[in-house]
Each structure stands twice: as structure tokens, then as C-alpha cells.
Amino acid sequence: MYCTKCGSQMEDDDRFCKKCGAEVGAAATHSRQSLEKNVALAVIGSAIIAGVGQLYLGKIARGVCFILVSFLATGIYMGVFRIAGMEDPSLGILSTGYAVTMAIVVAIKIWSMIDAYKLAHKYNDHLKKTGTPPW
Ligand SMILES: [Zn+2]
């Protein structure tokens, strides 16, 4: 067989390449698989709270952004629409402000889910090709 990193020929039962020292063969495949991210888990995480899937995938700043934007949207509703008295609080979930806020929150959530799905695939593809995580 050949080293997946430098391409030099090596014995079939060699675990490490003699030339470049890369770990190849069954052991390397196994350790690589354990690093792979669960795509479904990432999407479900972001479905529960936008940004959680990104945090799971190691995209911390991106995940935090999603969480902040969601809280910001809710905060704007609470602050502007309710406290500033731009809307009749007795309307509750029937109010326009609530509907708009919920639409924004759901849109952020769907965006976060699609993003988590794409990121998880990108992560796993990169891992399969190079043996290392992309970020
Ligand atoms: Zn090598």
C-alpha cells in the first residue's frame, strides 16, 4: 500500500509511514471516524437553539453569533414592542410584534440548521480527504 499523505510505498501492516511519519491504515481510519461529526446531531442542535449545532461543530464564534442574534430579536420585541408600549400587551401571541419576532426567530433557526448541515458535511469531507479537521 501507499502512504495517504506523501504517497511513498510502505508495507501492508505498517501503521506509520517510514518516510513522513503519517499514521495510515486501519488504525488511522478508525481514529478518523471517531473525529467525524454527526450531521443529524448538528442539525437537531440548531433546531432546538439556533447556534448550538455550530458550537458542536467547533465553530464557536459563528454559534455565539446565531445565539446572540436570536436573543437580540427577542429582546427587540420585549423592549420596543412591549415595554415601549408600541403594542397592546393584552393581544399576546396574536399581536403583530409577536408574529414578526417569531418569524424572525424561526428564520434564524432554519438558517442555522442549513448552515449546520453544510458545515458538518464540509467538516467530514475535509476529514476524509486530509485526515485532519478543516478548522
Ligand atoms: Zn508518508
Image (cartoon, rainbow, N blue to C red):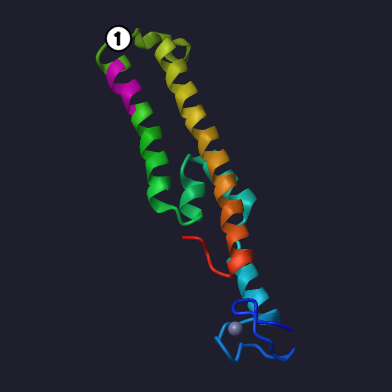
The residue carrying pointer 1 sits among few (fewer than 14), some (14 to 19) or many (20 or more) residues within 10 Å by Cα, namely few
Kindly give the residue lying farthest to the left in the view shown: 84
What residue sits 42% from the left and 9% below the top? 91
Q: Is residue 53 left or right of residue 83?
A: right
Q: Secondary structure at mark 1?
A: loop
Residue 110 vs residue 122, the one in the foreground: 122
Q: Quadrant of the N terminus?
A: bottom right
Q: Is residue 69 left or right of residue 9?
A: left
What residue sits 28% from the left and 18% below the top? 80
| Residue 126: in magenta span | no
What residue sits 51% from the left and 28% below the top? 107
Residue 74: image quadrant is top left
Which span is picked out in magenta? Answer: 75-80
Magenta stretch: helix, strand or loop mostly: helix
Residue that label 1 marks:
86
Residue 19 vs residue 66, the one in the foreground: 19
